[in-house]
Image: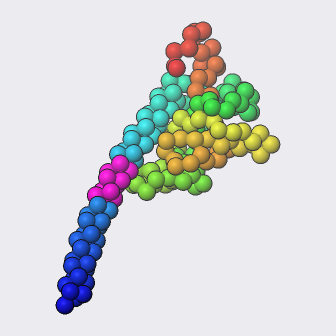
Amino acid sequence: MKILTSAIQNKILLAILAGVVSIGSFQVWQYNQAKYEKFIAGQENNCKVYIEMAEDSVKRSPSLRNFKYNNVVNQGIKQPGINSESEVDRRYILLYNKPVSTLPANALVYENGFFKSLLSKGNYPPESLLVDAVSFDLKNRQVTVSSDCAKKPFVVNLENLYETVQPVDIDIRGSNSDLFF
């Protein structure tokens, strides 16, 4: 009888312990989920800021604006690794003048509708994006860049990367001051 009572008590204690562990695990999962959702919201906000900043740079630059919307190439447009210095850890504009997605297919994005939409091709040139150069492969004419819009750095072609300030625009306006950044 004592053995049976002891076995029942042990099973009751194990059941209580299992309940406590499962409640604790659920609370940890909830905490991690809330933390992840907060992180994703921050990344989305940062991504939108860098898109807005890049779009503002394009709007302020007659040469970049003309290239993006009218496919008119000004010979003075500066592109890192093509006709200007290529610097790692420097910010550049990822810019397209034809209908493609904002981020290339090789970009790994977060599981979120906003980020997935950056991989969708539209009917017009996509929004421009400020990115940070991680490394240059001048031989293959590619750049690895990072962005808050993607989980990991991704590769883009040199042809799609532009200086944030175009000296040719400063000359066009007759000003020697850098009013853009």
- Residue 62 is one of the magenta-drawn residues: no
Image location (x, y in percent) of residue 98: 57, 45
On the rendered structure, is 39 left or right of 70?
A: left
Residue in the image at 27% along x and 75% along y: 14
The quadrant holding residue 111 is: bottom left
Image location (x, y in percent) of residue 89: 63, 31
Residue in the image at 54% along x and 24% along y: 61
Closest to the observer: 29 or 148?
29
Residue in the image at 25% along x and 65% along y: 20
Residue extending farthest front:
2
The quadrant holding residue 157 is: top right
Q: Give the range drawn in magenta.
A: 27-37
Image location (x, y in percent) of residue 67: 59, 34
Closest to the observer: 134 or 104?
134
Closest to the observer: 43 or 77?
43
Looking at the rendered image, the quarter that the N terminus falls into is bottom left
Residue in the image at 61% along x and 23% along y: 166
Image location (x, y in percent) of residue 84: 72, 26
The quadrant holding residue 82 is: top right
Residue extending farthest right:
139
Residue extending farthest bottom:
1
Q: What secondary structure is the magenta-colored segment mainly?
A: helix
Is any atom of residue 160 visible in this view?
Answer: no
The tally of labels here is: 0
- Residue 31 is one of the magenta-drawn residues: yes
The colour scheme used to paint the residues is: rainbow
Q: In this view, does 85 lie above or below 6?
A: above
On the rendered structure, is 54 left or right of 15?
A: right
Q: In this view, does 5 lie above or below 104?
A: below
Q: In this view, does 16 lie above or below 57?
A: below
Is any atom of residue 132 visible in this view?
Answer: yes
